[in-house]
Image (cartoon, rainbow, N blue to C red):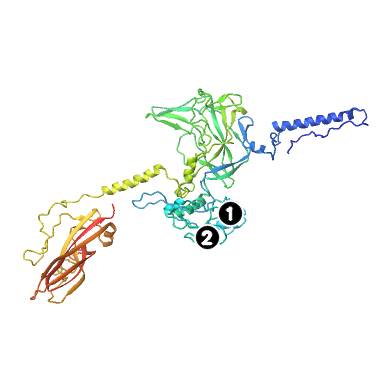
């Protein structure tokens, strides 16, 4: 037990008279003096509980170290008026969420993000990569294996001083391998090994050759690999998540904050705490509501700075001017290296009504660059027993109370597409301590102006079904697989719908005559002419199908190989067949050119096959016997094959259907063919 310092001596037991004591006043006063000393000693102890002597530490109430209820913990963060407009907050430790990702100096993974989308792609996530140099790995290695000095360390003489320490917290290498039977539905089995090298349970090896140890035992390397399958695949999400954790060093983690006590001065009531602006003839006039208002209510907080980070950036800015003008730069965000007291001002934002009936908010006049709220001057005037905070004396404080958590807890925009020093990466959390009532007619504060709201007991921020829903998400939510909101889903759906609508609109109408209209200038498709000797050279075709624009296209053609080359093209070309008396002649790759198709940009077989499914068929078109013995015979077979060849006469790419067959004693011999093409998609 620790006693207060005192000039008095506690005597136990008090001296009693003895049988041989003489009757003398000094002797008679000994027990009385000891009793007085004891009383004064007790008085000093009681006084120390109520108010310590100057320079002496508080010993608190009749609760002492080791008791079930420890006094030191009760007194943590206690706000106390210490004169004038100053408030002191006692030291203490608290658990806090660490939201700040701005300019992380000790990153263990240097991630680059490529947001470039392929043509026609509804893009949703970037392609991530790691490009960490040998110098980077040397720095990390030296920091973990060498004692740092104020000059240089390890293999990196250019990297100096103790700031190169990495302030490890365990999250930077801990692999979180989510186990969920529903992953089986995504084709991802999770088999376990029955034999292991260290008797620790393991999953079977992944594509990198590493055995997956049970969660909380498996740590992943600091390397240049994103894992098994690049950025994609459910089985790789945990690895990508860990690399992002290394990049931002566990942003959104929980950590301990060690607040070592501080005193803060509360700004007095200002005439511009409540005000509005009028716009008359393009001249803005500002009007103070000081005469109507009587108070504002500030929120006193402790801004979080964790014990495992070198610095934290706050969403408050120094150097912001209360007057408008053209300034060369922006105010610097405040940077703290230890937990710090802060004030959320309970007023200060003005309003302005525009000509188009909008109410604008003006927040730079009072405490520019600092957090504040739009207060209503009537909030402290009206209300009932259900509003406000009741004090010990029975009075109720009413007014505009800054929300104790939601105003100071700011989540960063965790986008890998942002520069490391982008202001969107600033996140902050704070511990609410007290409300401070700032009265207009008081030059100083009093203890009763401080309303202690330290959160010893709190409700859960999420309901059970909300927490359970997040935990049951498959694949599990993480930095690599963040939740998708309805707006993002709608944007992607609109993108897909827009692409579909655009593709349909891009299909042009057929040009010229419709396919159902006869071409009266074309003769019939005949295998032989009237005298039975020659096939016609005219094939009806009204409107060519343009490949790339048509969903379904058709074409037909025929050829006599006695009057064309072996590919079916007419002209001054070597003939594809010649007369024979009795000897069979065979072929395996003669062709019939197809009319009625405009290949457009699809000028090769490969390009056509990429866009269309092609079906071709055909048969014997003409077989004219010759010779004295009249022993002519011919046969053709369509192999279902086709290719694209240039017309020797025009150079135009043309589809030709391929045939095999044989013949003898003929003076004319040929085949016909038809091709049907069906688009593989819009």
Q: Residues within 10 Å of mark 2 (few under 14, many from 20)?
A: few
Q: Assess whether mark 2 and mark 1 are in contact (beta carbons under 8 angstroms).
A: no
Look at mark 1 in the image and give the residue it sits on: 160
Q: Which residue lies furthest to the left in this view?
A: 531
Whole-percent x and y of residue 461? Answer: 51, 38
- Give the number of the disc on residue 576: none
Secondary structure, mark 2, is loop
Q: Which of marks 1 and 2 is in front?
A: 2
Q: Residues within 10 Å of mark 1 (few under 14, many from 20)?
A: some
For residue 57, side relative to residue 142 (left or right)? right
Tell me which numbered mark, 1 or 2, is placed earlier along the sequence: 1
Q: Quadrant of the N terminus?
A: top right
Whole-percent x and y of residue 370? Answer: 52, 36
Q: Height in image: 486 above or below 572?
A: above
Look at mark 2 in the image and give the residue it sits on: 194
The quadrant holding residue 622 is bottom left
Whole-percent x and y of residue 206? Answer: 48, 59
For residue 679, side relative to residue 582 (left or right)? right
Q: Which residue lies furthest to the front in this view?
A: 194
Number of numbered discs visible in the structure rendering: 2
Q: Height in image: 657 above or below 354?
A: below
The quadrant holding residue 665 is bottom left
Residue in the foreground of this view, choosing between 35 and 264:
35
Whole-percent x and y of residue 624? Answer: 10, 69
Res. 441 visible in picture: yes
Q: Height in image: 327 above or below 355?
A: below
Secondary structure, mark 1, is loop
Res. 75 visible in picture: no
Q: How far apart are marks 1 and 2 (CA)?
A: 48 Å
Tell me the residue at 59%/46% (across/down).
307
């Amino acid at each position: 037990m620790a006693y207060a310092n005192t000039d008095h001596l506690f005597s136990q037991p008090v001296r009693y008279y003895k049988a041989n004591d003489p009757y003398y006043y000094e002797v008679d006063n000994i027990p009385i003096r000891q009793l007085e000393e004891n009383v004064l000693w007790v008085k000093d102890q009681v006084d120390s509980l109520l108010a310590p002597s100057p320079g002496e530490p508080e010993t608190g109430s009749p609760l002492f170290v080791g008791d079930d209820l420890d006094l030191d913990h009760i007194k943590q963060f206690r706000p106390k008026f210490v004169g004038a407009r100053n408030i002191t907050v006692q030291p203490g430790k608290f658990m806090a969420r660490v939201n700040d990702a701005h300019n992380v100096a000790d990153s263990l993974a240097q991630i680059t993000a490529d947001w470039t989308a392929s043509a026609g792609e509804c893009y949703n996530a970037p392609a991530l990569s790691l490009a960490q140099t040998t110098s980077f790995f040397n720095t990390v290695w030296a920091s973990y294996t060498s004692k740092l000095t104020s000059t240089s360390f390890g293999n990196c003489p250019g990297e100096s001083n103790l700031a190169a320490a990495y302030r490890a917290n365990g999250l930077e290498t801990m692999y979180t391998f989510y186990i969920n039977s529903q992953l089986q539905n995504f084709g991802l089995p999770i088999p376990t090994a029955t034999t292991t090298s260290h008797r620790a349970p393991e999953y079977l090896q992944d594509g990198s050759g590493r055995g997956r140890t049970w969660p909380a035992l498996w740590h992943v390397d600091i390397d240049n690999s994103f894992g098994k399958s690049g950025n994609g695949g459910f089985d790789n999400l945990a690895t990508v998540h860990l690399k992002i954790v290394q990049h931002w060093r566990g942003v959104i983690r929980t950590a301990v904050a060690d607040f070592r006590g501080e005193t803060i001065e509360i700004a007095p009531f200002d005439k511009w705490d409540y005000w509005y602006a009028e716009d008359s003839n393009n001249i803005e006039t500002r009007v103070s509501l000081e005469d109507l208002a009587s108070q504002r209510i500030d929120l006193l907080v402790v801004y979080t700075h964790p014990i495992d980070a070198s610095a934290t950036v706050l969403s408050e800015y120094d150097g912001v001017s209360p007057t408008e003008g053209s300034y060369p730069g922006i105010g610097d965000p405040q940077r703290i290296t230890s937990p710090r007291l802060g004030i959320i001002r309970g007023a200060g934002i003005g309003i302005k009504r525009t000509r188009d009936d909008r109410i604008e908010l003006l927040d730079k006049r009072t405490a520019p660059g600092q957090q504040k709220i739009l207060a209503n001057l009537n909030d402290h005037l009206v209300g009932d027993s259900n509003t406000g905070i009741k004090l010990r004396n029975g009075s109720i404080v009413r007014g505009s109370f800054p929300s104790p958590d939601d105003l100071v807890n700011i989540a960063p925009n965790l986008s890998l597409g942002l520069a490391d020093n982008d202001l969107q990466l600033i996140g902050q959390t704070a511990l609410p301590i007290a409300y401070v009532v700032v009265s207009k007619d008081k030059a100083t504060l009093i203890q009763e102006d401080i309303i202690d709201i330290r959160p010893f007991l709190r409700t859960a921020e999420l309901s059970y079904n909300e927490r359970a829903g997040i935990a049951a998400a498959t694949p599990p939510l993480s930095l690599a697989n963040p939740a998708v909101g309805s707006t993002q889903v709608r944007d992607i759906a609109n993108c897909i719908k827009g692409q579909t609508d655009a593709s349909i609109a891009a299909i042009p109408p057929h040009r010229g005559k419709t396919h159902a209209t006869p071409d009266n200038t074309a003769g019939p498709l005949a295998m032989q002419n009237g005298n039975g000797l020659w096939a016609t050279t005219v094939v009806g075709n009204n409107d060519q199908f343009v490949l790339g624009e048509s969903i379904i296209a058709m074409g037909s053609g025929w050829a006599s190989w006695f009057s064309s080359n072996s590919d079916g093209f007419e002209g001054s070309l070597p003939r594809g067949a010649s007369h024979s008396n009795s000897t069979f002649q065979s072929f395996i790759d003669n062709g019939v050119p197809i009319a009625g198709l405009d290949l457009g940009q699809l000028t090769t077989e490969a390009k056509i096959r990429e866009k269309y499914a092609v079906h071709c068929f055909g048969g014997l078109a003409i077989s004219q016997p010759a010779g004295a013995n009249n022993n002519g015979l011919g046969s053709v077979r369509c192999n279902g094959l086709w290719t694209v060849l240039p017309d020797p006469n025009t150079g135009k790419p043309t589809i030709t259907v391929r045939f095999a067959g044989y013949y003898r004693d003929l003076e004319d011999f040929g085949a016909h063919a038809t091709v049907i093409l069906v688009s593989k998609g819009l």
